[in-house]
Image (cartoon, helix red, strand yellow):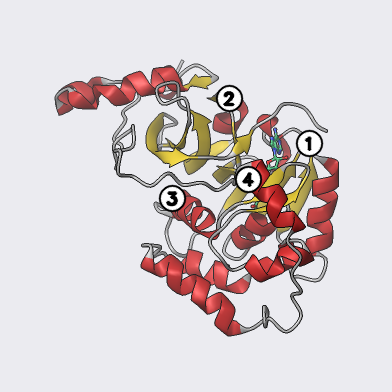
């Protein structure tokens, strides 16, 4: 067995173990270095009380109210440069810096991915219902997660990315703006079909939609330089880590035993194959489910 194999943790990766590792941050740096899986969170593992809770998924009763609110998009100028620039301005003000993320989000018309009745809210920083109890994530959360996903990659890197949870297809198309290839998996057939329809009039040659259980990843196109999940489970499926390329990064929401909520988890596969896990802020995503529906 190689050193890298020995260093790799057992799957599935349990947050309670990761949390234990994270708590070790209180111990001296020398002790941290001796751990087989080093954890160096850029932010505290449990969010400080003043940290805003990012809510990419709105409570369902609010989403239902939204879907009943009829608005007429005609004449709102949703295609206009101006409306999208305002959203970009807000993202930049909130600290989104990566030009790849900003220009990708500038390029993708979010209003095309939401129901007509909600199109007038498409450029607000809010999640919106997309049917079957699922939601399109808030723009600020999409930006934050993609920024984390590519933070360590060279600006000219031609990335292969796997997205779990296509939903309406918005984030998949944002990823496709800078990635060499994006594979996006959805377990609900009506949403898989809806994403295909939404994308029909938009350029997406490097984006492949797959109908299936994303917990298994998608081995035929592996390994991936980036894996990003839009739904959170109790653990990080082993298949995702197995399909992560060396130098690649995985970003996903995951249940946090300590708070009872979810946190963002980042897993890096370092040269040599070992994995490093870092916990970030609290988030709120729809559940990662097994099987297809
Ligand atoms: N990426 C979307 C967000 C979709 S919401 C956006 O652009 O905003 C999350 C999606 O994950 C839902 O459509 C849900 O059906 C899907 N999902 C949940 N568990 C899954 C699984 N095991 N495999 C694939 N998709 C899954």
The residue labelled by disc 2 is 238
- Residues at discs 4 and 2 in contact (Cβ within 8 Å): no
* Residue occupying image coordinates x 40% and y 37%: 270
Q: Does the residue labelled 4 lie within 8 Å of ligand 1?
A: no
At mark 2, the secondary structure is: helix
Q: Is residue 109 visible?
A: no
Q: What residue sits right under mark 3 in the picture?
A: 148
Q: Residue at x 52, y 37 (%)?
A: 253
Q: Which image quarter has ligand 1?
A: top right
Give the label, 4 or 3, closer to the camera. Answer: 3
- Residue 233 pos. (x, y %): 59, 28
Task: Choose the circle earlier in sequence order: 4 or 1.
Answer: 4
**Real-space Cα separation, disc 1 to disc 3, in angstroms:** 26 Å
Q: Does the residue labelled 1 lie within 8 Å of ligand 1?
A: yes
User: Left or right: 290 with respect to 179?
Assistant: right
Q: Which residue corresponds to the image point at 50% horizontal and 22% vertical from the top-left?
A: 13
Which residue position holds label 4?
Answer: 162
How many angstroms separate mark 4 from mark 1 (CA)?
A: 13 Å
Q: Which of marks 4 and 2 is nearer the N terminus?
A: 4
């Amino acid at each position: 067995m190689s050193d890298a194999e020995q260093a790799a943790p057992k799957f599935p990766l349990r947050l309670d173990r990761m949390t234990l590792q994270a708590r070790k941050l209180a111990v001296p740096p020398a002790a941290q270095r001796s751990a087989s899986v080093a954890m160096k969170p850029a932010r505290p593992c449990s969010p400080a009380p003043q940290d805003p809770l990012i809510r990419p998924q709105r409570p369902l009763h609010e989403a239902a109210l939204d879907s009943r609110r009829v608005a007429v998009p005609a004449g709102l100028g949703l295609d206009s440069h101006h409306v999208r620039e305002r959203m970009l301005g807000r993202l930049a003000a909130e600290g989104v810096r990566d030009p790849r993320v900003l220009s990708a989000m500038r390029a993708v018309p979010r209003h095309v991915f939401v129901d007509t009745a909600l199109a007038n809210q498409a450029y607000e920083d809010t999640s919106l219902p997309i049917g079957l109890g699922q939601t399109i994530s808030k723009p600020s959360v999409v930006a934050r997660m993609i920024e984390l996903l590519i933070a360590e990659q060279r600006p000219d890197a031609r990335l292969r990315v796997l997205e779990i949870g296509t939903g309406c297809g918005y984030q998949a198309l944002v990823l496709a703006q800078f990635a060499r290839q994006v594979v996006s998996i959805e377990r609900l057939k009506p949403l898989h079909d809806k994403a295909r329809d939404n994308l029909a009039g938009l350029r997406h040659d490097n984006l492949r939609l797959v109908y299936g259980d994303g917990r298994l990843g998608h081995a035929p196109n592996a390994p991936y330089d980036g894996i990003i999940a839009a739904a959170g489970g109790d653990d990080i499926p082993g298949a995702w880590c197995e399909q992560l390329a060396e130098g690649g990064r995985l970003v996903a929401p995951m249940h946090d035993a300590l708070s009872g909520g979810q946190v963002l988890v980042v897993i890096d596969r370092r040269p040599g194959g070992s994995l490093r896990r870092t916990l970030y802020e609290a988030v709120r995503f729809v559940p990662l489910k097994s099987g297809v529906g």
